[in-house]
Image (cartoon, helix red, strand yellow):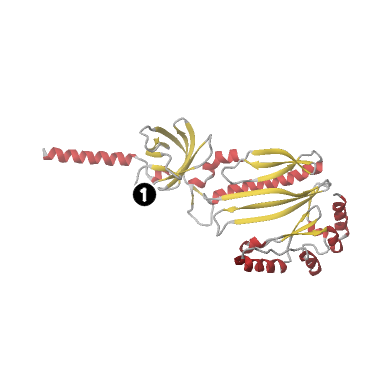
Amino acid sequence: MRHSTKLWLLISAALVLLSVSAYADDSQLRGVWKGSLGKQDIMVCFDNGESGEYYYLHYLSPLQLGKKKGELQWEEMGKTVTGIWSQLKAENNELTGLWQKPGDPKTVPIRLSRVVQTTQKETEAEGYLEPACESDAYFAKLQEVQQKVVVGKRQNYHGIPYQHLSANLLGTDRVESIEILEDSEPTLAINKLLHDAFQKNIDSYFECKGISRFFSYSSSVDIVFMDKNWLSVREWSGGDCGGAHPFADSSYRNFDRIQGKEVKVWTFFKNARNSEESLNKTILSYYKPRKSPNPSDIEGDKECQEAVETNKSYKLALSKNGIMFSTSFPHVIQACDEDIEVPYKKLLPFMTEAGKKAIKLLMEVK
């Protein structure tokens, strides 16, 4: 009887080992997979033995997968566990398993085919393997959908029709631009310049996504001023692509709507791109220092005032009543940035003849 009991224990242990060994190990899982969870088509990635991700092709919102070291099942990670993946088996680039809702005995089959294993990525660090969950192969379907442009409602800026454009992104990220709704050749030329920048920002979004899975990236274009002769827009971009700190940057672009080309407003001035002393004194005469009601912020207000008053570098935009001179401080004091609007008439003495001609057109249109 003892011998038979010992034999049965040995057989049971062997069966357990065989069962465990039949399940896919980390190296077999690593890579990008495509297939189905029940009747739903999905894309899946596994980076290592502890993290993965997947999304439904009809839903396109990634769900995190996590596994504790030494365990066989994976859990959908969120505020709560929404699903459990178990009995994952890999053979001949096919992966099968079961999905079930926590607390529910009913299981749903998982059937996947390998799209790509980990790939070598060009980098200065030899031997670097691109994480599967940051690869183009995993994001291919997402990128295909997100590249589609969503057209906003027709709007008017003082009688001039335009509309917003946005990429079909997920979550809180936004990549947006504008398009003027007129068919003249100059307007079409300006729309092309704006659309080229729009596409570049979409590309930057995916570059950011490729650098860090826990990324964020947004950009926008807003009209600052527009009339029949001129257009000024503010471009902004910001996010976190895994660097030392998040980033944010804004700039202005100005367009001649008669000639259909971009214009550098600093060229209106005699000393292009250099705010010489007398001009800077004029600019600062229209600066209104911040006055915080909070006593603890007073020192910060003083620091910002000093930064603005010693600044001599500005980004320029046209506005209804004057030119907007905007500071562009580094990240550490970016909160001190100011927009200072100076009336056109006050700027005429500092301008070239071409600049005066352009400004007079702006002064005439009210």
User: Residue 168 in the image: x percent, y percent?
Assistant: 61, 40
Instruction: Please name the residue shown 75% across and 43% down the image.
Output: 191
251 left or right, relative to 255: left
Amino acid tagged 1: Lys
User: Nearest the camera: 244 or 92?
Assistant: 244
Query: In the image, is residue 299 above or below residue 24?
Result: below
67 left or right, relative to 179: left
Instruction: Please name the residue shown 54% across and 42% down the image.
Output: 139
245 left or right, relative to 114: right
Local packing at callout 1 (Cα closer than 10 Å; few below 14, some 14-19, many 20+) is: few
User: Nearest the camera: 77 or 135?
Assistant: 77
Using the rendered view, name the quadrant where residue 162 is placed: top right
Identify the element where label 1 is drawn: loop
User: Residue 251 in the image: x percent, y percent?
Assistant: 70, 55
User: Residue 193 in the image: x percent, y percent?
Assistant: 73, 46
Residue 351 seen in this snapshot: no
Query: In the image, is residue 330 above or below residue 255?
Result: below
> Which residue is situated farthest in the left direction here?
1
User: Nearest the camera: 166 or 134?
Assistant: 166
The residue that label 1 is drawn on is: 69
User: Residue 267 in the image: x percent, y percent?
Assistant: 81, 59
Using the rendered view, name the quadrant where residue 17 is placed: top left
